[in-house]
Image (tube, rainbow, N blue to C red):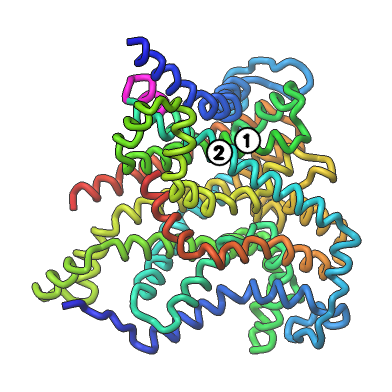
Amino acid sequence: MQMEKKAPLFIELILIAVSLIFLFPVFFLVEMSFKEPGIFFDPFRLPNSLYLDYYRAAFTKMDFFTGLGNSLIITICGLGLTVIVGSMAGYVLTRRNERLFRFILLFFLTGMVIPAVGSIIPLFKMAIQLKLVNTRTLLVLLYTAQFVPFASFLYSAFTKSIPKDLEESAQIDGCGMFKMYWTIIFPLLMPATGTFIITHVYSIWNDFLTPLIFINQAEKMTLMPQIVQFMFNQQSINYGPVFAVSVLAVLPLVILFVFTQKYMIKGLVLGSVKG
Amino acid sequence: MGLQRKQYATAIGFLAPAFAIFFVFFYFPFLQSVYYSFTEWNGLSAPRIIGLDNYKRLFDDPRMIDGLYNTLKMVVFGLLIQNPLALLIAVLLNRKFRTRAFLRTAFYLPVIISLVVASVIFGQILRYDGFVNGLLTAVGLDAFAVDWLGTVKFSFPSIIVLSQWQAIGYCAMIYLAGLQSIPPDMFEAAEIEGARGFVLFRHITFPMLMPAVSIVLFLTIVGALRLFDLPYLLTGGGPGTSSYTLFLAVYNSAFVNQNFGYATAGGIMLAVLIILVAGLQMAITRKREVEL
């Protein structure tokens, strides 16, 4: 007998009311990006028409597409590199149980506990020595270093569910281990890859601190610090364009979220439990 | 034998890139920061070892002290208010609803929005002539209309409340997934035994939820200790030092005052704090997990 837990109507109404409070800032964001200057600071007036000047300003006064491009490149490369090196590491960490591999697993574990705050300054110095300051490469490497422990754990957990005979039969065929991994194992690890990407794409895209510290050239800036700079340049005269840029910067993630929501919440839990 | 050695070598080759990137760009800088925290160093001249002076100075610095207090306030708020609220929302959401998909999206959507954009939004909502004060005035509560981000008394409490916009939804989703992983027959068995309502929650739901509680508490604490974007963008730590967090104090002593040795000492203190508090919390919740 399956118990149907039907919620009373008043609970549903309370939840809807609370959820509207949560949604209000999102509504406010979109609303403000269309609100003409005359009523901009009147909190109770809705936009009269679809006022598009802020979006025009966003494209002309700020180099939006440069920021978008940089954010895209860094996010894709950061996730890609982590998936490549993290999955290979996670795979052998499960398949080999020599002491070295168990030690490295523990070593990665410390990386998930130590916060990166203290290391920012030595990193900065090292970046100067390696001539990596002001490069997108540095950001990609930093994100990868930060995510590799989690990714390795995730892939290591998923590798356990792949039967070993698969690899053994491939070995007999004379496949090299490297080729065997990429053609047979990695495709089977797709669920881990999906989980990793939809839970970490936001961390890179939304990150403000790392580019703030390590990038100081306009043409390499990602969207988030770009928005902040734009905001400080606008001062208090008119925030409309800042809202327009913010909407544009959030939009790709919202679209992604709508399509991957179900997996994302699942992945969130899987990730936090297995990690 | 030759084949086995070759396989071993290949396996190391698989591990090497991840290990190298992690070591060079994460672990090694961390070890260096331990060394720098005992030195006076402005980034230009050579670091000079000064023993524990940096650590002593941390406790005379109003930014660090206010940062520490605020950070701890945030942790306490997270544990006592944010968590129960998130759990409540998760328990309420864990039923059959017509609007369930909508509700879940509504609570989770803020989580994916960057703190930069959140600051843009809340900076306007909370400005003195903004939406919140307009609403208060409209309903005759103008006495409560204050400068939310510009007064010593309200700046940090405002930031704490703003952080809940994302934190509650995030924690609620983890709790919700935890609730859904409890096998339904456990509830049936308990109900046959006569457990209802709060008793059911106290003796079945909550113990079964302990792993999720553990994760959420850990994330709450770490999140509180890492709070940087909101105070940096909304108040700059002000007025005075009233809305500093430890992270912001570390950032400013490094990149505004160029006091690198001192800043790393702050960073190490923050790291030790995170490890201590998180370790303590894990020890407590893990113990309960085993007991039950």
Name the residue carrying label 1. A142
> Outermost residue, left direction?
B193
Residue found 47% across the figure and 26% down from its top: B15
Residue A228 in percent (x, y) is at: 77, 55
Q: Which mark is residue B238?
A: none
**Closer-to-camera residue (A274/B67):** A274
Q: Relative to residue A209, is residue A265 depicted above or below?
A: below
Task: Give the residues drawn in magenta, as a range.
Answer: A97-105
SS for tag 2?
A: helix
2 or 1: mark nearer the eye: 2
Examine the rendered structure and indicate whether residue B49 appears above or below residue B238. above
The image quarter in which residue A254 lies: bottom right
Estimate the x, y position of residue A123 in percent, counting from the top left: 66, 29
Q: Chain for mark 1?
A: A
The C terminus of chain A: image quadrant: top left
User: Gap between marks 2 and 1, in whole Å?
Assistant: 10 Å
Query: At which x and y percent is residue B72?
Result: 50, 49
Q: Which residue is mark 2?
A: A82
Q: Observer-nearest residue: B189 or A260?
A: A260
Furthest residue toward right: A60
Q: Chain of mark 2?
A: A
| Dominant secondary structure of the residues highlighted in magenta in the image | helix
